[in-house]
Image: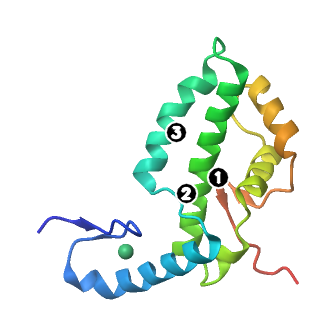
Amino acid sequence: MAARVCTICGFHYASPEDSAEHLALHKRFLRATRALGYVPQDGPAQEAAKQAAWPVVRDAARPLEERVAAAEAILRAQFDRSLRNTIFNGGPRDWQRHPSFEGYVAQALWRGTSFPPEVEEILLEKYGTAPSALRGTYWTPARHVA
Ligand SMILES: [Zn+2]
């Protein structure tokens, strides 16, 4: 039997025994994305977006606004991966505290990015910085905040 992938939540399962786990995660994904009004891209879409955007970000011959838009596409893919990870692997309500895209970018900029300085400068003007709760590119919930 070929591995199947749920087209809604992206769950991979190889045998019918995975159904209970899938159902729980599927319901969690639907509840979160309905409440957020936003559906993060799945893994393959995230990878495709990043692969298309990196050469544009690095191409100094292109208009700066185009390179900044490509950097935002990369950040969007990272944000989507972080949000999906929080929905699926975080506590049941952690996704409610995941930063917005704008907040996520401000945290990424606080840590520093690997974008060229002229691109990062525009992002800093647009998003500012915020103390980062990112570990790598993943947001991590602080569980002990009063
Ligand atoms: Zn599903």
* Relative height, residue 43 to residue 114 (above, below): below
Q: CA distance from mark 2 to mark 3?
A: 12 Å
* Relative height, residue 117 to residue 75 (above, below): above
* Sooner in the amino-acid sequence: mark 1 or mark 3: 3
Q: Residues within 10 Å of mark 2 (few under 14, many from 20)?
A: many
Q: As shown in the figure, which amino acid type bears the numbered disc 2? A: Arg
Q: Residue 115 in the image: state x and y as whole percent.
A: 69, 31
Q: As shown in the figure, which amino acid type bears the numbered disc 1? A: Thr
* Relative height, residue 52 to residue 134 (above, below): above
Residue for badge 2: 81
Are discs 1 and 3 less than 8 Å apart at CB?
A: no
* Relative height, residue 112 to residue 65 (above, below): below
Residue at far bottom of view: 20
**Which element carries disc 1, helix, strand or loop?**
loop
Label 1 CB sits under 8 Å from any ligand 1 atom: no
Give the residue drawn at x 29%, y 84%: 19
**Which element carries disc 2, helix, strand or loop?**
helix
Q: CA distance from mark 1 to mark 3?
A: 13 Å
Label 3 CB sits under 8 Å from any ligand 1 atom: no
**Which element carries disc 3, helix, strand or loop?**
helix
Q: Residue 11 in the image: state x and y as whole percent.
A: 36, 70
Give the residue drawn at x 61%, y 33%: 70
Image depth: mark 1 or mark 3 in front: 3
Image depth: mark 2 or mark 1 in front: 2
Residue for badge 3: 50
Are discs 2 and 3 less than 8 Å apart at CB?
A: no
Q: Is residue 133 left or right of residue 78?
A: right
Q: As shown in the figure, which amino acid type bears the numbered disc 3? A: Lys
Residue for badge 1: 137
